[in-house]
Image (cartoon, rainbow, N blue to C red):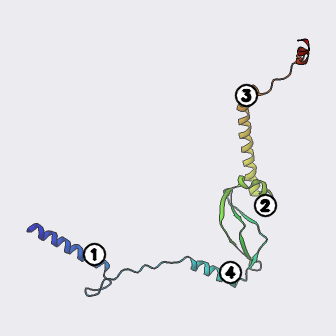
Amino acid sequence: MQRARTCTRRRIAQAECDNQRTRSSGKGTPRRKMKKVHKSSGTDDKKLQGALKKLNVQPITAIEEVNMFKQDGNVIHFSAPKVHASVPSNTFALYGNGEDKELTELVPGILNQLGPDSLASLRKLAESYQSMQKGGEGEEGKKDDDEDIPDLVEGSNFENKNEVE
């Protein structure tokens, strides 16, 4: 009997505690579920579009790619971005997915876009690449000597042997 009373008291205490969490005000009010408000990220885009319209931005269509050089030597690369610009207010807007790439990945087509800072980092990369190549040639040079075609020695004429036989 005593055990049943303590279990019942625990259940009542737990129910009261649960009621306090879900109740919106006093004792006599019904329990209501909490209404969760979801913030949409679309409002930021709308605000940005409104601010750009005030600046009178115009779309620029002839841009194929955009590269932004970072301090650490990496590049933020946009391929086929949408670009809007307002030259009098010095405002440019880029739309698209940017990829974080290393400078070496874009080297052949990016050389004419490099500034003095980027050229210095490119030189360092080229020097390290050359030193790696030289270090690799020392080990590979020994292996290549065994696999090369042997040089011809004078006095060995195989055509004459066939005629003699």
Task: Name the residue that disc number 3 marks.
Answer: 142
Q: Answer with left or right where residue 27 lies relative to residue 81.
A: left
Instruction: Determine crowd level at label 3: few under 14, some 14-19, many 20+ residues with C-alpha closer than 10 A.
Output: few
- Dividing the image into 4 quarters, which one contains the N terminus? bottom left
Task: Name the residue that disc number 2 marks.
Answer: 113
From where the camera sits, is residue 155 visible? no
Whole-number angstrom distance, CA of label 3 to CA of label 4: 65 Å
Query: Where, by quadrant of the figure, is residue 2 drawn?
Result: bottom left
Q: Answer with left or right where residue 137 lies relative to residue 47.
A: right
Task: Name the residue that disc number 1 marks.
Answer: 18
Q: Answer with left or right where residue 5 lies relative to residue 127.
A: left
- Residue lying farthest to the top in this orientation: 164
Residue 142, image x, y percentages: 73, 28
Image marks 3 and 1: residues in contact by CB distance under 8 Å: no
- Residue lying farthest to the left in this orientation: 1
Task: Name the residue that disc number 4 marks.
Answer: 52
Dot 1 amino acid type: Asp
In primary-sequence order, the first of circles 4 and 1 is 1
In primary-sequence order, the first of circles 3 and 1 is 1
Dot 2 amino acid type: Gln
Image marks 4 and 1: residues in contact by CB distance under 8 Å: no
Q: Is residue 143 above or below residue 16?
A: above
Whole-number angstrom distance, CA of label 2 to CA of label 1: 65 Å
